[in-house]
Amino acid sequence: MKYCITAPHTHSCDIQLPASKSISNRALIISALAHSTHPIHHLAQCDDTRVLIDAFNSNNSTIDIGAAGTAMRFLTAYYASQEGCDITLTGSQRMLQRPIAPLVEALQQAGAHIRYLGVKGFPPLHIQGSTLQGGHLTMPGNISSQFITAILLIAPYTMQGVHITLQGEVLSLPYIDMTISMMQQYGAKVTRHDNTIEVLPSPYKPIPYHIEPDYSAASYWYEIAALNGHSYHLTHLPAHSLQGDARIASYATRWGITTSFDSSGATITSTNSCNNEPQYFNLMGEPDLAQTIAMTCALRGEHFCIEGIANLRIKESNRIEALICEAAKLGYIFTSPQPDSLAWTGERCEVSHPIVIDTHNDHRMAMAFAPAALRFKEIWIDNPQVVSKSYPTFWNDLAMAGFTITHNETKENNSCL
């Protein structure tokens, strides 16, 4: 399936963002460990959260988490900590190509019984659960924060607790701090001092929990506002957030966007200002913003260099390669001067029509490229349903904001969305 996106009637509106899947998935694991019967309010309705819920409700010995990387990492640690559990964890073809060795090796150091069923270092995994010893663990800091979070989440249920030393520069630190903050809210005894994290053996307290709206989802509306000069009200988006991607509000000031908060959420307003200076970003703490920022800058004609994004190569797609490939269809020649960087110096190439963007089975590719309809007559998005991974209502929200969305060559009315 393909969607054709055009934007002749874009206007301001209120947007009800989805709940944060990052917070939702952490809350689900913690609640499961605590055997909590309290509600989790405003739980995300996306694919990545659904597969976690399905796993907890399943009696099968094999759990297929599809393309949900968070679920693969969190469930690996969760099942390893569950006495008597005997589970095989598998996923999509792309998931079987995404490395998991740093997590498995750390869990094995803590006493876990996990073995690879295919290529060493990659899923699928066979897990025999047991009460883990815990203890002192050393992990590289430049790995996915989800590996570290997975261990932290189960650490209160180990016999000795866990003392983690992260070596070198730490990627996605805001996600680790999010985990620690949530654990503390649930009563865990956890502290971080620089690259050292200590968790004492003390179970979580069952409590009700409310999930914030997703700042990663908000980033696409900052992109749209930066391109069309309109204002958007993002319902219930908090001024003070656990999410590292909340930094999009600060980054967007470079594009002339202000963010004002009140009890109903956030209003983002464009001043239509131009920035002729090359833009530099280090996204080591918030790599999920890379696609949004790269496309916003390019579509505004602003040169940029983004660093700190080496782990984008092992996401749902190789996001650096995917950005280079798809941006070229819009005439932008992106380069990767270093393994952890992406840049555009203004070099252009010819645009062929129709413009069909391949999502590379990556939800963030679809959502970051859709606003290009504000600069081109029309943009086709192939495999648009991938947005269900994190933002299932994205296309409906675009239609509500005045974008015209039609299906395949028949160009059906967007009311069928």
Image (tube, rainbow, N blue to C red):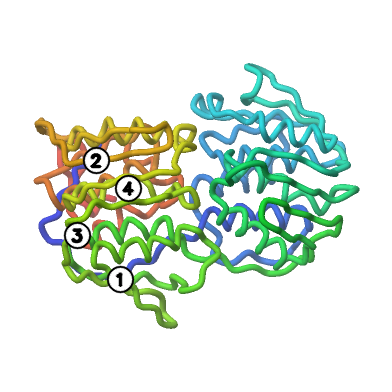
Say what secondary structure mark 1 lies in.
Answer: strand
Q: How far separated are the C-alphas under marks 3 and 2? A: 15 Å
Q: What numbered label is drawn on residue 367?
A: 4
Q: Amino acid at mark 4?
A: Met
Foreground tag (1 vs 3): 3
- Front residue of 239 and 40: 239
How crowded pointer 4 is (Cα within 10 Å; few <14, some 14-19, many 20+) is rated as many
Left/right placement of residue 42 relative to residue 295 reads right
The residue tagged 3 is 275
Give the labeled residue for mark 1: 268
Whichever of labels 3 and 2 marks the residue nearer the N terminus, that label is 3
**The residue tagged with tag 3: helix, strand or loop?**
loop
Answer yes or no: is residue 1 visible. Answer: no
Find disc 2 in the rendering and name its residue: 344
What's the amino acid at mark 1? Answer: Ile
Q: Nearer the viewer, residue 133 or 348?
A: 348
Distance in Å between CA atoms under marks 1 and 4: 18 Å
Residue 111 in the figure: left or right of residue 411:
right
Camera-nearest label, 2 or 1: 2
Question: Where residue 163 sits: x, y (%)?
Answer: 79, 49
Instruction: Say whether disc 3 or disc 4 marks the residue closer to the N-terminus.
Output: 3
Q: Secondary structure at mark 2?
A: strand
User: Front-most of 104 and 13?
Assistant: 104
Give the mark nearer the N terminus: 2 vs 1. Answer: 1
The residue located at (13%, 50%) in the rendering is 375
